[in-house]
Image (spheres, helix red, strand yellow):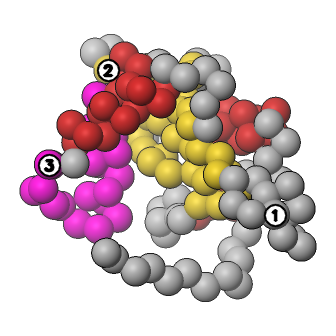
Amino acid sequence: MTLVRRAAPKDAEELVRLRKIMLDACSGPNPDVSWQPLAVAALRERLGDPGGNLTAFVVERPGGLAACAIGSIERPLPGPGNPRGVVGHVFSVATDPDMRRQGYSRACMQALVGWFREREVPKVDLRASPEGEPLYEALGFVRTREPAMRLAL
């Protein structure tokens, strides 16, 4: 049985290290690490707020973390498909390369989905890498038709 726990502010540096692994796997290695201190500070602050809208679940390994899943709750305006105006978002699901295929990401994701359920979040979005799709499908995620666009300012 994999022991999953909720992340604490002390885990911020390890969460950012795992995020870098995930980002490099999705987009290719990027030498820019200027964002990392800002991400550590943001995680320390937000994970320290027990009633906040961001959480992470982790599996530990000696000397650090083996895996994580981070999620947040957003509150856009209500609409026909979401009358309460609540949406969950999953990001930074990552496992150290030498710790993969042991169910750690699955365990973290199951805990995160439970956190969303406890808060009555009606839908949860994520962007999946091809490697992650089977895990997310097994947890009930399905592809949507919603197009995504972005404006970089």
What is the quadrant of the N terminus in the image?
A: top right
Which residue has dot 3 on it? 34
- Number of numbered discs: 3
- The residue at the point 12 percent across, 56 percent down is 32
- The secondary element bearing badge 1 is classed as loop
Q: Any mark on residue 78, and which? A: 1
Q: Any mark on residue 134, and which? A: none
Q: Is residue 142 above or below residue 119?
A: below
Which residue has dot 2 on it? 64
- Whether the magenta-drawn stretch holds residue 121 is answered as no
- Judge depth for marks 1 and 2 and give the one in front: 1
- Whether the magenta-drawn stretch holds residue 16 is answered as yes
Asked where in the image residue 83 lies, by quadrant, the reply is bottom right
| Distance CA(mark 1)–CA(mark 2) | 40 Å
N-terminal label among 3 and 2: 3
Q: Is residue 152 left or right of residue 73?
A: left
- The residue at the point 50 percent across, 51 percent down is 91
- Judge depth for marks 3 and 1 and give the one in front: 1
Q: Is residue 64 left or right of residue 123?
A: left
Per the rendered image, the range of residues in magenta is: 13-34
Marks 1 and 2 in Cβ contact (< 8 Å): no
| Distance CA(mark 3)–CA(mark 1) | 36 Å
- The secondary element bearing badge 2 is classed as strand
Which residue type carries mark 1? Pro
N-terminal label among 3 and 1: 3
